[in-house]
């Protein structure tokens, strides 16, 4: 990562041109960043028009954040003291949410009509990344669930972990028991990398200006920070209560062996070893 960062910084410096005048360099930098934002937006729109639904959904995921950031910046410039006014701040949040909702609904609509697990995972992460729309306008997002992802991706332990967490929080013991039983039978754990990883080849990543690469990478980082992370609490609580139940204990041993063998995640393998 450090080598990549160093190389990117060198490319960025070269792209704006060397200058002994700090003010001139700063001006060039701001101009390059603005051009990169415009190019990133155009690339996302190009991907949104793709016939590949996975590419389209991943582009919509990043575009939801791009559009929200753009509206937030526009409003902050127009109303610089909005943060001190509760009514203004609430209206700003509503505007930003409305912009996101358009893209999120389209992702969810595409996923609802598909059996593709990667496409559905994109919708699940996108719709769980931000709060539900207060006005119920995210009608398609409201139909996206961990259990439906698990049905489309039954050999993958990750959606079953999400399903177990939801069942536990909503106090649905039968669904929790089912999710745990399915976890003991999974073949792998894959969080499904969505967003920018699905777009690199489509966007011609290696040929893009380093500022554009950075703009897209920052969008991807922003959505990953907000998306829901894998939860293990429901599973560990269920197994911790299994000491006197032989059937439960057998299920937990099956889960433990599968998680301990997961070389892609030190966290999961460690949890599996302790179950």
Image (tube, helix red, strand yellow):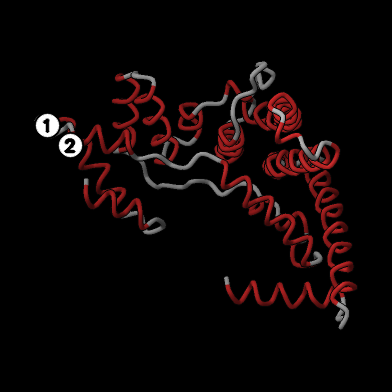
Could you classify mark 2 by the number of other residues whose Cα lies within 10 Å: few (under 14), some (14-19), or many (20 or more)?
some
Relative side of 184 to 130, left or right:
left
* Secondary structure found at label 2: helix
Q: Which quadrant does the N terminus fall into?
A: bottom right
Relative side of 246 to 167, left or right:
left
**Location of residue 11 in the rendering, given as x and y in whole percent from the top left corner:** 77, 75
Relative side of 224 to 180, left or right:
right
Tell me whether circle 2 and circle 1 mark residues in contact (CB < 8 Å): yes
Q: Which quadrant does the C terminus fall into?
A: top left
Q: Is residue 110 visible?
A: yes
The quadrant in which residue 72 appears is top right
The span from disc 2 to disc 1 (Cα, nearest Å) is: 6 Å
* Residue highlighted by disc 1: 246
Above or below 4: residue 36: above
**Location of residue 232 in the rendering, given as x and y in whole percent from the top left corner:** 35, 40
* Secondary structure found at label 1: helix
Relative side of 105 to 270, left or right:
right
Residue visible at 68% across and 57% down? 217
* Residue highlighted by disc 2: 250
- Which residue appears farthest toward the left when viewing the image? 244
Name the mark on residue 224.
none
Q: Is residue 102 visible?
A: no
Residue visible at 46% across and 32% down? 150
Residue visible at 89% across and 67% down? 27
């Amino acid at each position: 990562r450090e080598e990549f960062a160093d190389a990117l910084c060198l490319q960025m410096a070269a792209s704006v041109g060397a200058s002994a005048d700090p003010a001139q360099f700063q001006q060039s930098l701001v101009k390059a960043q603005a051009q990169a934002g415009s190019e990133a937006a155009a690339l996302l729109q190009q991907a949104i028009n793709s016939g590949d639904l996975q590419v389209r959904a991943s582009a919509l995921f990043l575009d939801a954040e791009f559009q929200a950031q753009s509206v937030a910046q526009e409003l902050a410039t127009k109303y610089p003291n909005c943060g001190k006014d509760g009514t203004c701040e609430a209206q700003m949040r509503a505007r930003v949410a409305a912009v996101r909702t358009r893209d999120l609904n389209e992702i969810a609509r595409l996923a609802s009509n598909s059996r593709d697990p990667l496409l559905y995972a994109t919708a699940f992460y996108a719709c769980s990344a931000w709060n539900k729309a207060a006005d119920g306008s995210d009608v398609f997002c409201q139909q996206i669930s961990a259990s439906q992802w698990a049905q489309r991706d039954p050999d993958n332990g990750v959606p079953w972990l999400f399903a177990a967490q939801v069942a536990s929080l909503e106090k649905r013991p039968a669904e929790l028991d089912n999710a745990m039983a399915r976890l003991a039978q999974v073949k792998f754990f894959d969080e499904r990398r969505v967003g920018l990883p699905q777009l690199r080849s489509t966007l011609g990543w290696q040929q893009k200006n380093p500022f554009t690469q950075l703009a897209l990478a920052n969008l991807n980082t922003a959505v990953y920070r907000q998306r829901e992370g894998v939860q293990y609490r429901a599973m560990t609580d269920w197994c911790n209560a299994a000491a006197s139940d032989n059937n439960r204990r057998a299920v937990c041993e099956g889960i433990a062996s599968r998680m301990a063998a997961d070389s892609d995640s030190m966290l999961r393998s460690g949890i599996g070893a302790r179950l």
